[in-house]
Amino acid sequence: MQVNSTEISSGRQIHVDLPESVFDVPYNESLLHQVVVAQLAGLRSGTAVQKNRSAVRGGGRKPWKQKGGGRARAGSIRSPIWRGGGRAFPGVLQSYKQKINKKMWAGAMRTVLAELLRQDRLQFIVAEDFPEPKAKIGRAWLENAGGDDVLIILAEAPTNFFLALRNFPRVAVAQWQDVGPADLIRYGRVLMDVAAAQKIAEIYG
């Protein structure tokens, strides 16, 4: 399939051939949902940890005898109902990762790229760099590109280009190998460098 690629600064357009096996496949919502959930779950740290009653220091001696004192039975001052006691259901180190094989990941990438292209939310651009790492230059470039709320995918991110755009809250610049299905659907639009599109076509085609 043939698509147009635009150089944002000059407006010059060139035609690029991309494989239909990657950018023109049927939409598979269930597969995309499963892979996106797995990708987001893998980002969870799982490091929230509290101490249970056995991990809290102290409390080895029974605070008072079992019977005859008129008070409720107590076996340790580190019981969860005591102040300074352990947590009843403490958080533990855990991993939230879900297994997703390579074919499922590739299928999800293909289906989301094709759907973005059908919705006119995926635009191909020619990679370029800025003369200076200035946010003012980056803002002008974004206005020519159609505004923010955009993910920019490049084969290689030039230094000035990255520095000029890194402080905009709804703009992200990433290299093609660092992007997953959840990243592609997070933003309103995706601008993809031609070289990055060809790399993706080689991997997922």
Image: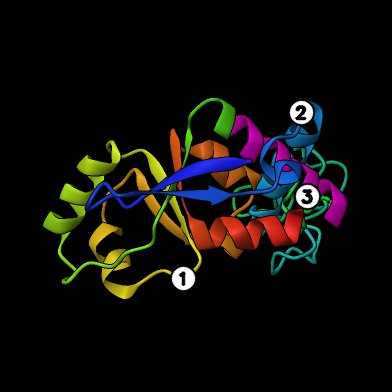
- Residue 17 got which mark? none
Quick one: SS at disc 1? Answer: loop
Query: Relative to 114, does residue 63 appear above or below in the rendering?
Result: below
Q: In this view, does 74 lie to the left or right of 119?
A: right
Q: Is residue 32 left or right of residue 43?
A: right
Q: Which of marks 1 and 3 is in front?
A: 1
Task: Read off the residue under disc 3.
Answer: 105
How many numbered circles are shown? 3
Within 10 Å of the Cα at label 1, are there few (<14), some (14-19), or many (20+) other Cα atoms? some
Q: Quadrant of the N terminus?
A: top right
Q: Is residue 114 left or right of residue 128?
A: right
- In magenta, the rendered stretch is 102-116
Evaluate whether residue 69 shows in this view.
Answer: yes
Within 10 Å of the Cα at label 3, are there few (<14), some (14-19), or many (20+) other Cα atoms? many
Q: Nearer the viewer, residue 30 or 53?
A: 30
Residue at 29% x, 42% y: name it.
Answer: 145
Q: What residue type is labelled 1?
A: Glu
Evaluate whether residue 49 shows in this view.
Answer: no
Give yes or no for residue 75 being in the magenta stretch.
no
Look at the image and name its color scheme. Answer: rainbow
In the rendered structure, which disc, 2 or 1, sits on the residue that comes first in sequence?
A: 2
* Image coords of residue 205 (percent x, y): 76, 53
Task: Read off the residue under disc 2.
Answer: 26
Quick one: SS at disc 2? Answer: loop
Within 10 Å of the Cα at label 2, are there few (<14), some (14-19), or many (20+) other Cα atoms? few
Residue at 74% x, 32% y: name it.
Answer: 33
In the rendered structure, which disc, 3 or 2, sits on the residue that comes first in sequence?
A: 2
Q: What residue type is labelled 3?
A: Trp
Query: Relative to 115, does residue 97 appear above or below in the rendering?
Result: below
Query: Relative to 82, does residue 25 appear above or below in the rendering?
Result: above
Give yes or no for residue 115 being in the magenta stretch.
yes
Task: Read off the residue under disc 1.
Answer: 156
